[in-house]
Image (cartoon, rainbow, N blue to C red):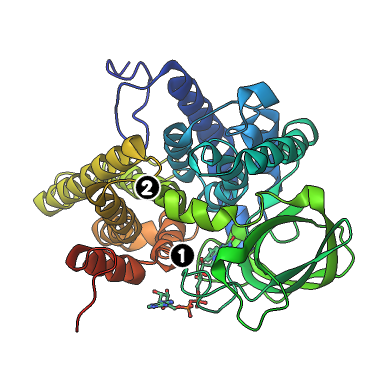
């Protein structure tokens, strides 16, 4: 028993004085991951197929509603709790953790994060009434929500309005456009689409971003394209096409104009892709320790731990993992609306550290364990490929994080050069 945590394992986020809810959810995620998800991960990767069996388990455990408030029948996890649990899932199956994040985010943004987004009284009342429908679908019907934002333009990086549009019509919206990289395509019941309200003006404006749930059964909605990527193959992130898709007013996940304010108020909403990759970093480290100790089930009992170079490599991996855990935990515990400049810069640093670090630890793991460790029947080569994807994910790719950090350090808001 690990004294400070009260758990019989060290969570992917490290040890910490967890709350009873965090402890219970971490134990649940660890058990599911270790006993169910780990053994299935190779199948989704091999087939590039969606982890439906894992979603059945997540649903049965109530984890589809992890961030749905308790008053609405969910588990009522806050931001930090979700981030800790996400890392634990990522330790056993990257594609499950990443897609689960897309689903959970749609309930977290509309739930616990929405409380910190400025809204008028009318907007708040509208929001609280509308989100009940989405929460009910998740909790009672086990519905899955996807989060397709990317379009292959500058929009997902936050630098331009979304090209997908929604025009107000009687009783709802008419959606037109295209999304790429839509994880959970074909598996989701609803697609939480970011689009720009078409007001008939010449110049679309990002302040008019709408967040709408498009039912998978909608007329005019279709999925296309191949899916055969390097890593995160179980996410099945294909293209979506919306051709005059009618969605009713009830499908609005946020009132008009509120998403834009939310993105400005709550930068930590974009950090939710990181737990998956912290989980993968732990997986690479866990594997290396077992492999060098000759404790990987089914492998020949050849110990490799006696070589000083291996010991040094493991020490380096542990140092990097501790750095990732420390900055991750600090960032998730201090996440709040309108963070200070230091908190915001630390959040970017945490994103960069986890996304780049996960692949670096996986690279070191392969180098240290050696050639036999990268065979397909072992998880390490999959972890290596999956971990490569983290720093490519918009809006906070490794490049864009460096870009933001440098600019926001050297320029105060509104400052310009001559
Ligand atoms: C496994 C996986 C699952 C995904 N799932 C989803 C999902 O569910 N929903 C979703 O919306 N998206 C998803 N994405 C997409 C992801 O968030 C990015 O949109 C995608 O990786 C961008 O690829 P791209 O080639 O279009 O990037 P490009 O836009 O071509 O950009 C290439 C690189 O240039 C840099 N760059 C981009 N814009 C700028 C700029 N304005 N200024 C400076 N540099 C810039 C970035 O570093 C970027 O990585 C997923 C991606 C992966 C890998």
Q: Quadrant of the N terminus?
A: top left
In the image, residue 169 lies at what x, y percent? 85, 64
Name the quarter where the C terminus is drawn: bottom left
SS label for mark 2: helix
Horizontal side, residue 352 vs residue 319: left or right: right
x and y, in percent, of residue 414 in the image: 29, 68
Dividing the picture into quadrants, the one containing residue 198 is bottom right
Residue count near mark 1 (Cα–Cα under 10 Å), binned few <14, some 14–19, many ≥20? some
390 on left or right of 257: left
User: For mark 1, what is the residue?
Assistant: 393
Q: Is the residue at mark 1 in contact range of ligand 1, meaning its CB lies under 8 Å from it?
A: yes
**Residue 334, numbered label:** none
Position of residue 130 relative to residue 98, above or below, is above
Which residue is pictured at 55% across the width and 53% down the height?
A: 95
Residue drawn at x 31%, y 51% as measured from the top left:
347
Mark nearer the N terminus (1 vs 2):
2
Residue situated furthest left in the rendering: 308
> Residue under circle 2?
278
Q: Measured along the vertical axis of the image, is residue 93 above or below residue 85?
A: below
Label 1, label 2: how far apart the Cα atoms are: 15 Å
Where is residue 348 shown, x and y percent of the image? Answer: 30, 56
Left/right placement of residue 312 relative to residue 104 reads left
Q: Determine the image quadrant of residue 293.
A: top left
Please tell me whether mark 1 sits on a helix, a strand or a loop.
Answer: loop
Residue 93 seen by the camera: yes
């Amino acid at each position: 028993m690990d004294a400070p945590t009260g758990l019989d394992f060290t969570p992917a986020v490290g040890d910490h004085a967890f709350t009873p809810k965090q402890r219970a959810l971490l134990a649940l995620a660890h058990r599911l991951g270790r006993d169910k998800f780990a053994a299935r991960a190779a199948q989704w990767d091999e087939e590039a197929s969606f982890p439906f069996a894992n979603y059945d388990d997540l649903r049965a455990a109530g984890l589809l509603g992890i961030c749905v408030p308790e008053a609405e029948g969910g588990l009522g996890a806050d931001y930090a709790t979700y981030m800790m649990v996400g890392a634990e899932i990522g330790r056993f199956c990257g594609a499950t953790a990443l897609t689960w994040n897309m689903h959970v985010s749609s309930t977290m943004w509309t739930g616990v994060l929405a409380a910190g987004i400025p809204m008028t009284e009318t907007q708040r009342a509208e929001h609280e009434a509308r989100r009940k429908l989405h929460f009910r679908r998740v909790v009672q019907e086990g519905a899955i929500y996807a989060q397709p934002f990317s379009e292959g333009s500058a929009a997902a990086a936050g630098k331009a309005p979304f090209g997908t549009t929604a025009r107000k019509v009687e009783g709802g919206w008419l959606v037109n456009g295209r999304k790429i990289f839509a994880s959970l395509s074909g598996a989701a019941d609803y697609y939480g689409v970011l689009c720009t309200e078409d007001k008939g003006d010449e110049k679309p404006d990002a302040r008019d971003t709408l967040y709408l749930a498009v039912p998978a059964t909608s007329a005019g909605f279709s999925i296309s394209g191949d899916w055969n990527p390097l890593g995160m193959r179980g996410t099945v992130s294909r293209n979506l096409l919306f051709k005059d898709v009618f969605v009713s007013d009830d499908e609005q996940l946020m009132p008009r104009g509120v998403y834009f304010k939310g993105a400005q108020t709550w930068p930590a909403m974009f950090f939710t892709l990181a737990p998956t990759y912290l989980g993968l970093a732990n997986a690479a480290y866990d594997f290396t320790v077992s492999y060098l100790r000759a404790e990987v089930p089914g492998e020949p009992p050849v110990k490799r731990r006696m070589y000083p170079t291996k010991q040094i490599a493991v020490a380096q991996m542990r140092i990097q993992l501790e750095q990732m855990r420390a900055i991750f935990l600090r960032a998730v515990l201090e996440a709040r609306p309108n963070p200070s400049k230091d908190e915001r810069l630390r959040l970017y640093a945490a994103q960069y550290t986890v996304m780049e670090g996960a692949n670096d630890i996986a690279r070191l793991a392969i180098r240290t364990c050696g050639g036999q460790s990268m065979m397909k029947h072992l998880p390490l080569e999959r972890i290596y490929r999956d971990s490569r994807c983290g720093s490519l994910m918009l809006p906070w790719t490794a490049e864009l994080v460096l870009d933001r950090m440098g600019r926001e350090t050297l320029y105060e808001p509104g400052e310009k050069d001559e």
